[in-house]
Image: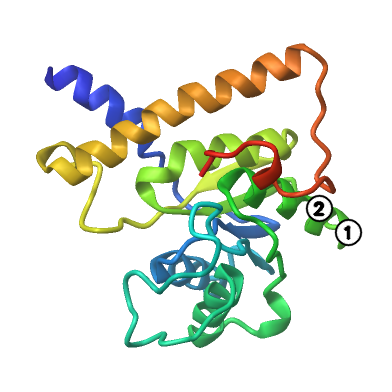
Amino acid sequence: MADMMADIAQFIFLEDEPQQADIIFVTGGAYACEGHRAAELYRAGYAPYILPSGRYSVHDGRFVAVADEPQRYPGPYATEWEFLADVCAGDGVPREAILREDRAVSTWDNARFSRRVTDAAGLAVRRAILCCKSLHARRAYMYYQFFYPETKFFVCPCDIENITRANWNTTPQGTALVMSEVEKCGKQFGEMFVQRMQGIVYDPDEPSMKDRWAGVK
């Protein structure tokens, strides 16, 4: 059992040492820690741009609330991008270094709409840092790598809800969230690669996945 739990942790909780990159991507969400991590890496000189992504969750239909620092970031915020950009700016990142993607309603959308933004800006993204929640790291990496196949990624996550690689399987909440990620990785990527084999090509300019992949978060 211990070996199986270690294998799951190794699969889900990706983490790399930060390296010099062309951009720092931030997946959407309501946790300020992702913005703090991105800002920390920007200030350390790892990349010249940060691109937070996100409108709100497809399941909520609106930006509900800041999850981890509501008193520091009372809002109100209309989008995840607005919130995360505020976090980064508050941590010393110049507004002109923060690119904008505020259409995404899922992790899938975060990746493909970010590709649209970087292409429109003429950015050649050969190396990128990906800031995300640690228990979401594998799925976030898979999606971004799918839309940036030519890019070398360095995953630099943050822990949320006191759930870590070391303790995820010691609480019902941690176990449920991590095993849900395992399930989603298998189901969603199985569908993606079957469709790729069938010759289906995804255009970053298409409408949100809300109209195509209901249930993908």
Give how far across and how far down residue 114 sits, in percent.
72, 54
Q: Is residue 136 above or below residue 8?
A: below
Q: Could you say whether the residue bearing mark 1 is in a helix, strand or loop?
A: helix
- Quadrant of the rendered structure where residue 166 is? top left
Judge whether 193 appears above or below 58 on screen.
above
Give the amino acid at mark 2: Arg
Q: How many marks?
A: 2
For image coordinates 21% across by 43% down, the residue present is 174
Colour setting: rainbow
Task: State the CA–CA distance, disc 1 to disc 2.
Answer: 6 Å
- For residue 4, above or below residue 39: above
Q: Crowding at label 1, few (<14), some or many (≥20) Cα neighbours within 10 Å?
A: few
User: Disc 1 marks which amino acid?
Assistant: Ala
In this rendering, position of residue 164 left or right of residue 117 = left
Give the quarter of the figure containing the N terminus.
Answer: top left
Return the x and y of residue 45 as percentages of the image width and height.
58, 70
The picture quadrant where one finds residue 99 is bottom right
Residue occupying the point 78% across, 48% down: 207
- Residue pictured at 45% horizontal, 30% vertical: 184
| Nearest to the observer: residue 217 or residue 23 | 217
Secondary structure of residue under mark 2: helix
Q: Residues within 10 Å of mark 2 (few under 14, many from 20)?
A: some
Above or below, 201 relative to 197: below
- Tell me residue 201's x, y (percent): 82, 28
Label 1, on which residue? 120
Q: Nearer the viewer, residue 118 or 110?
A: 110
Residue 47: quarter of image? bottom right
Q: Is residue 43 left or right of residue 100?
A: left
Which residue is drawn at the image coordinates 19% and 45% (left, top)?
A: 173
C-beta proximity under 8 Å, tags 1 and 2: yes
Residue corresponding to mark 2: 116
Q: Is residue 83 left or right of residue 10?
A: right
